[in-house]
Structures are given as structure tokens and as C-alpha cells.
Image (spheres, rainbow, N blue to C red):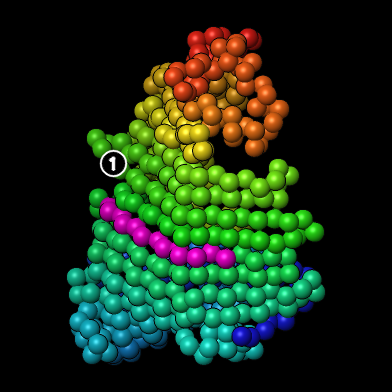
């Protein structure tokens, strides 16, 4: 275990940890470029590595040199990690062995071994000690056909930081990962068994983290693609007494998945959060325990062409700001293009849906579903859209919303009793006025909103909107 002494009043470990993860992710995927790009020169490879690193938004390449040899080349980048406050200087070195038999270890265009070091020699020495003098390895094999295969190994370690307000200990188990890119298809697999942050205020432990994903593009110019990403977490626990108050978190079996699809010229995307068990305390309401918590959201019927143009415009803007941070955010041409494409998206009639928001109590399930549409959007013109943007009340009149709450009555009474006894006491009055209706063992409420008017179970809400 090694110690980092900092004059800062608060520990920078969490911020550096996030930044390091971003950089590691960028470096691990830095050579995952398309087959058409791999046919270009090794100098272009160096430029690609640099661009991928800056794409994290957390790292800035201050300078880059490239030395080309007959069998081997070296790219050295001086990188600043951070967002302007207490930035950390890094040295990133890419050792490139050229094909067709790079280093006599594989058949391909190149092997790229990436080395990351802190520019401060004293800090680098302490980090090496934290890793037990083992080195992280990032190796990418560029195949003859242009595909890439990257393997990542981050050794286990422990790091202690001492500051004016106490000490923090960051420890982690070894992380491994593989990234495959065949040009238009790519896949990612990352595994991190445990991460722990301990301070005088408490201990946060994250265990069993894994990320798996795949993506497919229609062609090399497709800025969107379709695919799926799945993040799983076996558990996350926190216990501490910040400010003298007892706080606690116990999360188990988390699964976060996102998926995007393309059908008949329209994109659909969704994200799902599934939690097996969630317990927490210290929020002023005692200890709460929830089971089988689910939140499923989706956004569909997004027209492919205007969406792709918007993404391309925003990517261009991001590159402009990297090249010149003082440049204007948008040119007039970019503003016009984004406005026209946004209008085209609205005219296509996008649909936002809460496919499911639910949890399970002892007495049963509580489920909320709903969707929001813009039925009149197909007739929008630029002038009307601008007027609606300046008048939220008028814009709200175009929205049509449907939602349903369906809950097992014992479960709803149990939940309200835990969260707010006053709300539980008022449940019967909602049933009496018809805002909740009994259907067997369930209580049901149907909300409808359109044309500026809202109803619950068919009853108009006074005043409208």
C-alpha cells in the first residue's frame, strides 16, 4: 500500500478514478477504427489514437510526436487529465510493431502496446508501488483485414491519500477487458470484480461489475448504428456517518441495459434499469427496503436521416471546440441545420414511453406505465415551432399523454405507510372520489391528457392546463 500526500482539503480520489476510467476506456478502444482506415498510413493510426483519447472530454493532448521505424514506431503524447482544477499530467506511449508479422507474435498489420505514466516521477513511483510494481497492459492487434482486437489488464492495487480533512483508501481487484472491432461490427467485454473507497466518513464497496455490448453500423459514414449495452452489478454497499448521521445503502443485482434498433427508416431506443433489492437509510424516513425495482424507458419513431444529420453536426461542433475552445458554439449554418432537422424529427411523431416503473412489496406489485405523443406535429412549420418554443403552455396543448397506475391494494398501503403515513391515511378518500378504482385486488388509476385538458378515470380535473 502506498500513500499520496496532497495539500488539497478534500480527497481527489473519486475524480481521478472517474477520469482514469475514461482514459482507460479511450485507450482500450483507441485503435478500433474501420477497415477503410486501417489501409491508411501508420501516421494516420497515430492521429486516430490521439483523437480517440481527446474524445473522452476529460483528457487533452498537449503535444504528440511520432517516430517511424522499419519494423517499429513510437507515438508519445503529453496528456492533461482533468477539467481545469488540479489537472494531472500524463505521458501516453504507444509502441507500434508493424506487420505482416508484428513482433513475430501475430499475423496482422500491427500490434500496439499502450503505456500510461504520470509525468511527475514521484507520483509515478507511488502509483507503481500501489500496483505492486505490476504494469497495466493494453494490447491491440490490428488484423490484415482491418479488424482490431484489444485486450486490457489492470492489476489489483491499493492507494492511500492523506489530506487536511483525513485520509482515503482506494483499493481494487484486477480489471480485464476485450474489445473487438471488425469494421462495421464491434463488441465490448469488461469485468471488474471489486472497487472499494474507504474514508473517515464511510466505506463504499462495488462488487461484481461487468459491461458487455455490441454495435453494428450500416456503413462507414453511419454516425448512429444499432446495438445493445448491458451493465451488471452484483452489489453496491455504503455505510457511514457523515456529519454524525448514519447513512446506508445496500443494492443487489443491478442490471442496466440499453438497446437501439432501426426499422423502416425509424430508430427506436430504450434503457432499462432492474434492481433486485434496494435498501437505504439516513434520508429522514428511517430504513427503506424495496424489491424488484424496474424502470423501463423508451423513445421511438425517430426519423433516421434528420437524426443522423443532427449527430454529425454535433460531432463536428465537438471537434471544433476541441480545436479552438474559444470558438463560438454554433455557426449560423449549424443553427439552421439543427433547427431544420429537429423540426423533421418532430414531424415524424416521436413517442416517449414509460414502459414500466414498478416495485414489489409483500402485498404484491405496484406498476406505472404511460406514453406521450405529439399527434399534431406532422403539420408543424418553422414559424409555429418557434412560437411554441417560446410558449411552453401552448406547446403543452399539443401533447397527448396516457398513463396507468395499477397496484395491489395491500402493496400500495404498505408502501405509503412506510414513506408517508399521512398519504396512507388519505388513500381512502382518493378511492371515494373515484381517482382510484378497485378492480379485484388492485387499485387502478387511468390518466389522460390532451388538448390542454386532463382526466383521471374519466373525471375531468378542474381548471385544466
Q: Is residue 155 above or below residue 446?
A: below
Give the residue drawn at x 73%, y 75%. Answer: 167
Give the residue drawn at x 47%, y 34%. Answer: 365
* In-front residue for pair 129/57: 129
Is 210 within the magenta?
yes
Residue 274: x, y in percent? 45, 47
Which contiguous range is marked in magenta? 205-217
Q: Is 45 situated left or right of 78 in this image?
A: left
Q: Which residue is mark 1?
A: 262
Element under disc 1? strand
Q: Is 453 situated left or right of 74 in this image?
A: right
Is 350 within the magenta?
no
Residue 398: x, y in percent? 49, 19
* In-front residue for pair 107/379: 107
Residue 29: x, y in percent? 38, 68
Magenta stretch secondary structure, dominant: strand
User: Tag 1: Cα neighbours inside 10 Å, few (<14), some, or many (≥20)?
Assistant: some
Amino acid at each position: 500500500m502506498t500513500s499520496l500526500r496532497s495539500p488539497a482539503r478534500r480527497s481527489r480520489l473519486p475524480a481521478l478514478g472517474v477520469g482514469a476510467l475514461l482514459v482507460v476506456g479511450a485507450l482500450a478502444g483507441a485503435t478500433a477504427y474501420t477497415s477503410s482506415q486501417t489501409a491508411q498510413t501508420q501516421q494516420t493510426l497515430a492521429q486516430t489514437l490521439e483523437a480517440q483519447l481527446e474524445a473522452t472530454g476529460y483528457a487533452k493532448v498537449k503535444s504528440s510526436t511520432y517516430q517511424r521505424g522499419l519494423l517499429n514506431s513510437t507515438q508519445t503524447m503529453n496528456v492533461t487529465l482533468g477539467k481545469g482544477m488540479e489537472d494531472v499530467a500524463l505521458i501516453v506511449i504507444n509502441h507500434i510493431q508493424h506487420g505482416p508479422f508484428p513482433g513475430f507474435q501475430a499475423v496482422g498489420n500491427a500490434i500496439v502496446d499502450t503505456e500510461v505514466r504520470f509525468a511527475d516521477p514521484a507520483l509515478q513511483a507511488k502509483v507503481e508501488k500501489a500496483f505492486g510494481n505490476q504494469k497495466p497492459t493494453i494490447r491491440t492487434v490490428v488484423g490484415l483485414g482491418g479488424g482490431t482486437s484489444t485486450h486490457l489488464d489492470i492489476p489489483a492495487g491499493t492507494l492511500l491519500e492523506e489530506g487536511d480533512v483525513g485520509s482515503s483508501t482506494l483499493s481494487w481487484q484486477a480489471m480485464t477487458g476485450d474489445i473487438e472491432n471488425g469494421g462495421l461490427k464491434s463488441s465490448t467485454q469488461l469485468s471488474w470484480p471489486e472497487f472499494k473507497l474507504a474514508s473517515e466518513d464511510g466505506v463504499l464497496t462495488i462488487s461484481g461489475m461487468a459491461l458487455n455490448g455490441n454495435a453494428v453500423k450500416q456503413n462507414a459514414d453511419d454516425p448512429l448504428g444499432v446495438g445493445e449495452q448491458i451493465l451488471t452489478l452484483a452489489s453496491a454497499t455504503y455505510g457511514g456517518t457523515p456529519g454524525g448521521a448514519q447513512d446506508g445503502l445496500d443494492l443487489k443485482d443491478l442490471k442496466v441495459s440499453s438497446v437501439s434498433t432501426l426499422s423502416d427508416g425509424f430508430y427506436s431506443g430504450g434503457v432499462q434499469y432492474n434492481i433486485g433489492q434496494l435498501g437505504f437509510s439516513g434520508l429522514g424516513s428511517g430504513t427503506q427496503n424495496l424489491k424488484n425495482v424496474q424502470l423501463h424507458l423508451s423513445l421511438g419513431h425517430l426519423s433516421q436521416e434528420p437524426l443522423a444529420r443532427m449527430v454529425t453536426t454535433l460531432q463536428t461542433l465537438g471537434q471544433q471546440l476541441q480545436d479552438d475552445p474559444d470558438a463560438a458554439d454554433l455557426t449560423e449554418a449549424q443553427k439552421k441545420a439543427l433547427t431544420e432537422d429537429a423540426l423533421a424529427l418532430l414531424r415524424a411523431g416521436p413517442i416517449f414511453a414509460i414502459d414500466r416503473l414498478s416495485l414489489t412489496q409483500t402485498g404484491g406489485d405496484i406498476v406505472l406505465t404511460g406514453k406521450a405523443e405529439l399527434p399534431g406535429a406532422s403539420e408543424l412549420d418553422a414559424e409555429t415551432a418557434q412560437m411554441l418554443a417560446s410558449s411552453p403552455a401552448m406547446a403543452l396543448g399539443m401533447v397527448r399523454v396516457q398513463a396507468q397506475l395499477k397496484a395491489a391494494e395491500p402493496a400500495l398501503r404498505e408502501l405509503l405507510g412506510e414513506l408517508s403515513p399521512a398519504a396512507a391515511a388519505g388513500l381512502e378518500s382518493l378511492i371515494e372520489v373515484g381517482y382510484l378504482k378497485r378492480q379485484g385486488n388492485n387499485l387502478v388509476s387511468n390518466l389522460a391528457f390532451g388538448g390542454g385538458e386532463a382526466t383521471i378515470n374519466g373525471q375531468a380535473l378542474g381548471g385544466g392546463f
